[in-house]
Image (tube, rainbow, N blue to C red):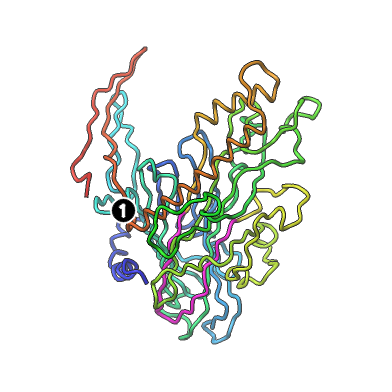
């Protein structure tokens, strides 16, 4: 177990009292391009979720939401329940779909600085902040989040996530997750199951809602759904170069990623017939048929950066993750009908399909994005009561910038509708959108670099306090002050 993980566990129960002074149901990273909301309990007014996150990238850009859900799932191969009965392939998920649900314990956001004071026309427009300010945290934003498994297994998940405002590092978050097998499966603290040793595994999952969310507003795009592909690649195989970090046994990253793609059955934008358009409508990047703006150019992905070899050995096991899978939302997940048994699904290193549209023998890329999750499986771990292990992973995004989405989208619009002006055809559009994969891989390489600096990277100055007034044809900046006290550790 990492030293930082042990220290965290030792002080956790002391800090719980302090956390209860600042009760939160959600915690956020919202200082950079990637906006992340962690939910302690309740998703979309539902009370049967806990331990999930929703994400938006890039933050603040006109409703370009592209990741609906991130979560973990746990599985114990053999587990002895409180009645002394042995259960096999016991599965825990954050929703009450399988054998249990979550026990929310605490969640809190730490920011390095108070939000800047913003005064506009003598009115306070300062952004609200719920959490704690700590100038000594290694990142600009830091979330501590603890939940347990209810009814089954008896695992506590101690989650620490790190986010940055440095413009070279605000496209990802780092998550350090420590798992404690304490046998507690209800709201009353204490061991509820007999002493035992279990084989335990878990996975991260990302949902594939990039183009669906970007295209869901029919007033803007004329679309009500989108399509995407899920696959994986290694950093060195794709980039053809070494990682920034050169002195570690883990000298490559296995990156599971997704992106928007065409759907050959949809030959014209929704609301248009084939007779109304002269060209086939290629959905890659979700070009807005009304403006040309590329609404979903993002590539999103996940990579394991460190996984303890065992509960007694905190050295990095470079053979983890094991499986690099995808799973169907309707077929394999909610329907509980797995092509493989769940244990094998998580820990079998042979389960690494390269392209799901080929693996499933699709005649074309018809995979609906709302029906697929990316999975990186980690395990198995042999755990006795009181055992602890840790893993670190990064979730990141990459994309061409917003200006290109607008300017090059306008050229595509001219080409698609046969209008005068500069033009960009589908081949040019798709080549441009594909640059997002390069950005994603670069960003996750930077995340691995930051992790190997103990999550501590060069710090920019805090955002300035600002006061402005406006009137006809003028904006006056009356005050612009950097609060540099304690701005550097």
Figure check: 167 above or below 3: above
Residue 250's image quarter? Answer: bottom left
Magenta residues, dominant SS class: strand
What residue is at 21 percent from the left and 38 percent from the top?
483
* Direction from residue 322 to residue 174 in the image, left or right: left
**Which residue in the rendered view is the most extreme toward the right?**
275
The residue under label 1 is: 456
Q: Where does the image place residue 433, in percent across and percent down from the top left?
A: 58, 37
Q: How many marks?
A: 1
Figure check: 196 above or below 455: below
Specify the segment rendered in magenta.
374-394
What residue is at 31 percent from the left and 69 percent from the top?
3
What residue is at 32 percent from the left and 55 percent from the top?
22
Residue 211's image quarter? Answer: top right
Residue 96's image quarter? Answer: bottom right
* Direction from residue 321 to residue 458 in the image, left or right: left
Q: Where does the image place residue 173, in percent across and percent down from the top left?
A: 42, 51
Instruction: Please state, as top left, top right, bottom left or bottom right, where the N terminus lies in the image.
Output: bottom left
Looking at the rendered structure, the secondary structure element under dot 1 is loop
Q: Is residue 164 magenta?
A: no
* Direction from residue 283 to residue 241 in the image, left or right: left
* Direction from residue 206 to residue 453 in the image, left or right: left
**Which residue in the rendered view is the most extreme toward the top?**
472
Q: Nearer the viewer, residue 80 or 226?
A: 226
Q: Is residue 383 magenta?
A: yes
Q: Where does the image place residue 47, in percent across and percent down from the top left?
A: 52, 57
């Amino acid at each position: 177990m990492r030293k930082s993980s042990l220290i965290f566990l030792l002080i956790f129960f002391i800090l719980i009292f302090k956390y209860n002074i600042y009760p939160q149901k959600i915690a956020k990273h919202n200082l950079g391009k990637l906006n992340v909301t962690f939910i302690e309990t309740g998703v979309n007014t539902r009370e049967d979720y806990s331990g999930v996150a929703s994400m938006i990238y890039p933050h603040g850009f006109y409703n370009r939401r592209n990741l609906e859900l991130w979560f973990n799932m746990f599985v114990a191969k053999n587990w002895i329940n409180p009645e002394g009965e042995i259960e096999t392939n016991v599965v825990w998920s954050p929703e009450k779909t399988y054998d249990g649900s979550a026990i929310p314990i605490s969640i809190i956001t730490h920011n390095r600085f108070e939000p800047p004071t913003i005064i506009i026309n003598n009115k306070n427009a300062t952004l609200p902040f719920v959490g704690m300010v700590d100038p000594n945290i290694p990142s600009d934003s830091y979330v501590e989040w603890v939940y347990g498994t209810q009814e089954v297994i008896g695992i506590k998940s101690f989650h620490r996530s790190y986010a940055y405002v440095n413009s070279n590092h605000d496209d990802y978050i780092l998550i350090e997750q420590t798992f404690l097998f304490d046998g507690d499966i209800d709201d009353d603290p204490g061991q509820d199951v007999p002493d035992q040793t279990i084989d335990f595994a878990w996975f991260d999952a990302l949902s594939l809602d990039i183009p669906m969310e970007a295209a869901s507003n029919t007033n803007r795009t004329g679309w009500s759904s989108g399509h995407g592909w899920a696959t994986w690649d290694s950093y060195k195989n794709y980039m053809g170069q070494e990682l920034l970090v050169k002195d570690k046994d883990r000298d490559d990253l296995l990156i599971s990623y997704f992106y928007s793609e065409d759907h050959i059955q949809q030959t014209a934008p929704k609301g248009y017939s084939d007779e109304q358009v002269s060209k086939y409508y290629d959905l890659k990047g979700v070009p807005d048929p009304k403006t040309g703006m590329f609404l979903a150019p993002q590539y999103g992905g996940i990579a394991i950066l460190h996984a303890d070899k065992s509960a007694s050995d905190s050295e990095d096991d470079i053979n983890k993750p094991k499986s690099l899978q995808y799973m169907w939302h309707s077929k394999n997940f909610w329907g509980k009908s797995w092509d493989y048994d769940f244990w094998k699904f998580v820990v079998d290193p042979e389960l690494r399909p390269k392209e799901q549209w080929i693996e499933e023998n699709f005649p074309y890329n018809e995979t609906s994005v709302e029906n697929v999750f990316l999975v990186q499986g980690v395990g198995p771990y042999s755990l006795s009561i009181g055992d602890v292990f840790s893993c670190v992973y990064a979730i990141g995004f990459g994309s061409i910038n917003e200006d290109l989405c607008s300017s090059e989208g306008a050229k595509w619009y001219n080409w698609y509708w046969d209008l005068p002006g500069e033009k960009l055809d589908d081949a040019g559009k798709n080549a441009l959108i594909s640059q997002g994969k390069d950005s994603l891989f670069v960003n996750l390489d930077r995340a691995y670099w930051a992790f190997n600096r103990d999550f501590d990277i060069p710090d920019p100055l805090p955002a300035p306090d600002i006061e402005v007034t406006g009137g006809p044809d003028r904006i006056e900046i009356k005050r612009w002050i950097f609060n540099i006290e304690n701005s550097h550790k």
